Amino acid sequence: MDLRQALAAKKDAVSARWVEMVHKGYPFATVGFLRTQANPFVNPVGHRTKEAADAIMPVLLATEKDVPALLPALDEALEEFMRVRSIQEISPEEAVGVIDGLKNVLRAELAPELEKYNLYKELLDIELRVDAIGLMAFGIYTRCREKIYAMRVEEVKRANSQVIRRAERIIARAAAAGTGAEAGTENEE
């Protein structure tokens, strides 16, 4: 038996355990809601987490040559998962670290097979894929946070645009007065 066969047999258990691990990172009162509410509009966190698990597992199970075909679906699912996590009040380590936590889930679920068939070298190969997925997630998370900060800057600019326009007019008048041109008063507006 190889590790991918063992993982294929336990993929649902691994996915469920990883989703549960992600949910446990939320406040206790939220965990029950995440587990029980299946509506993606009411529970986007639970829905996106399940989608991410469903996209990650095929990548871990695939042969090296089949992985590129799975990357678009993985990228889309990670994008949605990280987008939700990027707007939450959690640290970047918590937001992206759940991907790395998948390695602990794999080790726990596959422990009997790892021991019985000495599949530790194969586990390292799968963990390298988890690391690559984690790097993808980090890049996506970073882009999402950059968008959030850009939106905040634009919001501040819009909120202060009248003040900025008035300051520009005052500066222009002061510059005109300094060159001998007739300056208007500040109260002309």
Image (cartoon, grey):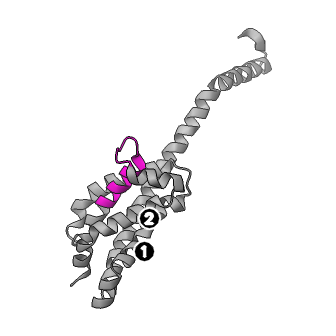
* Foreground tag (1 vs 2): 2
Q: Residue furthest top?
A: 188
| Amino acid at pointer 1 | Asn
Left or right, residue 5 beside residue 17: left
Query: Which residue is identified by label 2?
Result: 21
| Amino acid at pointer 2 | Met
- Give the vertical position of 39 relative to 25 (above or below): above
Say the numbered circle drawn on residue 89: none
Residue 12 magenta? no
- Give the vertical position of 171 relative to 48 (above or below): above
Query: Which residue is identified by label 1?
Result: 104
Left or right, residue 11 beside residue 143: left
Observer able to see residue 142: no
Question: For the image shown, how many numbered marks are present on the structure?
Answer: 2
Q: Earlier in the sequence, mark 1 or mark 2?
A: 2
* Quadrant (top left/top right/bottom left/bottom right) for the C terminus: top right
Left or right, residue 189 beside residue 113: right
Rendered image quadrant of residue 39: top left
The residue at 21%/72% (across/down) is 63
The residue at 36%/74% (across/down) is 106
In the rendering, at what x and y percent does residue 33 appear? 44, 50
Rendered image quadrant of residue 69: bottom left
In the rendering, at what x and y percent does residue 56 appear? 31, 63
Q: Are marks 1 and 2 in contact (CB under 8 Å)?
A: yes
Q: Which residues are magenta?
A: 37-54
Q: Which of these two is toward me, 61 or 142?
A: 61
The residue at 56%/57% (across/down) is 91
Q: Secondary structure at mark 1?
A: helix
